[in-house]
Amino acid sequence: MDDDNHSRVIASLFAVVRNIQEVAEFTNFATLLAFAGVNASVIKLFGTGDNIRGFKKVLMNIILPGAGVLASLWLASQTGWVAITFGLILLGAGIAAYLLIKAFRRKKSKE
């Protein structure tokens, strides 16, 4: 089975599970949340510490990524309440899984 057929099978499965508009809203919400996370990471990695000197570095490492976070979150809030609810449930489940794995690894390393 080639890639085109794989895409058709996956698209058909999505169509069976939900209508295509809801699938698009879920995808948009997840993508926009990922963009917000990437921009927040830029602020965390490059916008802190002693390396922020001068307007250009502040602009590139704090202001523009901050605007990206705000724009991404605003656009994500426009996807519809079903997509937001579903996305936040998945985000919460992901955070819970991360914390459980982190606690398990910490406990295992102490043994």
Image (cartoon, rainbow, N blue to C red):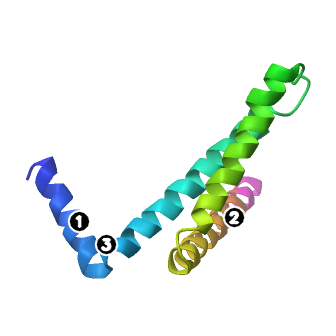
Q: Are marks 3 and 1 in contact (CB under 8 Å)?
A: no
In the rendered view of the protein, which quadrant contains the C terminus?
bottom right
Q: Residues within 10 Å of mark 3 (few under 14, many from 20)?
A: some
Residues shaded magenta: 106-111
> What residue sits right under mark 3 in the picture?
20
In the figure, residue 46 lies in which quadrant?
A: top right
Q: Is residue 27 left or right of residue 101?
A: left
Point out which mark residue 11 bears.
Answer: 1
Give the mark, 3 or 2, whose residue is nearer the N terminus. 3
Q: Residue at x 37, y 70 (%)?
A: 23
Labels 3 & 2 near each other (Cβ < 8 A): no
Mark 2 vs mark 1: in front: 1
Give the prevailing secondary structure in the magenta stretch: helix
**Does dot 2 land on a helix, a strand or a loop?**
helix
Label 1 secondary element: helix
Residue 107 counted in the magenta span = yes
Residue at the spot of label 2: 99
Q: CA distance from mark 3 to mark 2?
A: 33 Å
Question: Of discs 3 and 2, which sits in the foreground?
Answer: 3
Residue at screen point 17% across, 56% down: 6
